[in-house]
Every structure is written in structure tokens, then in C-alpha cells.
Image: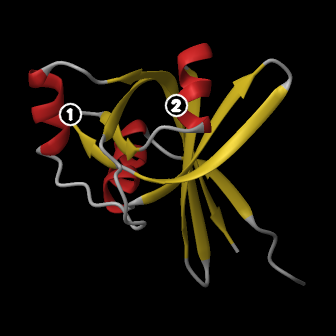
Amino acid sequence: MTNQPTTTTLTEDRCWELLSQQEVGRLATAVGSEPEIFPVNYAVADRLLYIRTSPGTKLAELAVNEHVALETDLVAPDAAESVVVKGTAEILHTDADLATAEATGLETYVGGDKDVWVRITPSQVTGRHLDR
């Protein structure tokens, strides 16, 4: 008899622990009937998510629809965990907001001028754990 995989719901605290341990996620946006998914580096501070980016499609879509989702995963040989954050994205402009974002120490994987900061304020955080 083969063991069946089991799925359990993560607590909100475990979701934030996992989010804090990871650096890479996928940011989902939607404008009209065209959803987009972007790989992003992110940082967590005070249960808020911060992303550094540059002008382009991602920012244009956030200007049209501020509602986003971000997903990150932890995959091991015998288990996997996935967290999804749904919330509101805001492009940061004030000195205080920018200082808070820069204090996260977030470094981007891809070089270039990624000098635009975005903060995601969560409205929902959910996660699942899968045992193989």
C-alpha cells in the first residue's frame, strides 16, 4: 500500500516565517482579461512585503490595478510548502516609506537600475503544507 500525500493548512505565523525565509516569489497582476506573473525578489518587514523594480510592464499594471498576489514556495525531498499573499501594491514615494523599504536590505538578483520600491499590504495570507 502506497502512502497518500497529505495536505494541511499553514498557520498565519508559519506563512510569515516561510515568507521571511525566502527571497524569490512570483507576483501576479491582472489588467483587463490578461493576467501576468513576474518573478521577483522580495523582502519582509513588519508583515509587509517590499519589491524593487524598474519602469516597465509590472509598474504600468500596478498603476491600473493595485490588487496583486504573490506566491513563494519551499520544496524539499519529502515535503513542500506554498504561501500566497493577496493584497494591495503601492509604489513608494515619501522619504519615510523609501527609508523603511531600503532598511530591508533587499538586493535584486538582476542588476540594473531597480530604483522603484513597491510595498504590498496583505489582505489575506494563506499557505499549505504537502507531505509526500
Task: Tell me what residue is drawn at x 76 percent, y 67 percent.
Answer: 5
Residue 81 falls in which quadrant of the image? bottom right
The amino acid type of the residue labelled 2 equals: Leu
Relative to 2, residue 62 above or below: above
Of mark 1 and mark 2, the one earlier in the sequence is 1
Which x, y percent locates residue 7?
Answer: 68, 55
Query: Which quarter of the picture shows residue 49?
Result: top left
Decide: few, some or many residues near mark 2? Use Cα within 10 Å; few <14, some 14-19, many ≥20.
some
Q: Residues within 10 Å of mark 1 (few under 14, many from 20)?
A: few
Residue at figure coordinates x 11%, y 45% from the top left: 103
Q: What is the image's colouring?
A: secondary structure
Looking at the rendered structure, the kind of residue marked 1 is Asp
Query: As rendered, which of 78 and 33 lies closer to the eye?
Result: 33
| Closer-to-camera residue (120/72) | 120
Give the residue number, with chain letter if any, for mark 1.
46
Rendered position, 1 above or below 110:
below
Q: Is residue 65 visible?
A: no
* x, y percent for residue 123: 47, 19
Q: Residue at x 50, y 23 (%)?
A: 87
Q: Residue at x 64, y 38 (%)?
A: 28
The quadrant of the picture occupied by the N terminus is bottom right
Disc 2 element:
helix
Tag 1, which secondary structure?
loop
- In the image, is 96 to the left or to the right of 30? left
Label 1–label 2 contact, CB within 8 A = no
The Cα atoms of the two marked residues, 1 and 2, are separated by: 23 Å
Numbered marks: total: 2
Which mark identifies residue 59?
A: 2
Tag in front: 1 or 2: 2
Give the position of the C terminus as an image quadrant.
bottom right
Q: Residue 8 at x, y = what percent?
A: 62, 51
The answer to whether residue 21 shows anywhere in this view is yes
